[in-house]
Amino acid sequence: MRLKITLAKTAILGGLLASLLITSPANATDFCAGKYKQADLNSCTAKALAYEDKQLNQTYKEFRTLLTPQEKEQLKKVQLLWIEFRDKSCDFQLRDVEKSIYPMIMNNCQTKYTEARRQELAIEIDRLQ
């Protein structure tokens, strides 16, 4: 029974990792090409997250220019809640991940959510223009 649970967790983790590494134009594979050591993978996935976070911040700022003062305040509240959701969702998804690969998987999880949020805001920008 325990073996089945462990195998299921491994399969889920493998699928999660594969889906997270194939996300955006500046995904972890772009930053991690040729990296094989865990510390290097942790570092390069952190760079991918920082890149996607920067892209999100630029899109967020652009979106704000199209909003009324009331909408800007509402967006700020929504964005803060979204950050909390992203972080807690990734924490939950990674609850059984081993310590050595945790930073890499967490970075990838947050990158995936951050990219999706940037795309959501970009759609709103297109809708308003």
Image: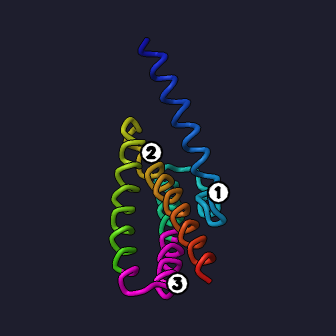
The residue under label 2 is which amino acid type? Ile
- 71 within the magenta span: yes
First of labels 1, 2 by sequence position: 1
The segment highlighted magenta reads: 51-72
User: Label 3 belongs to which residue?
Assistant: 62
Q: In what element is the residue under mark 3?
A: helix
Q: Nearer the viewer, mark 1 or mark 2?
A: 2
Q: How is the image coloured?
A: rainbow
Name the quadrant containing residue 76: bottom left
Q: Where is residue 119 shown, x and y percent of the image?
A: 58, 67
Q: Residue at x 37, y 67 (%)?
A: 78
Q: Quadrant of the C terminus?
A: bottom right
The residue under label 1 is which amino acid type? Gly
Q: Quadrant of the N terminus?
A: top left
- Left or right side of 30 for 7: left
Q: In what element is the residue under mark 1?
A: loop
Which numbered marker is on residue 101? 2
Q: Residues within 10 Å of mark 2 (few under 14, many from 20)?
A: few
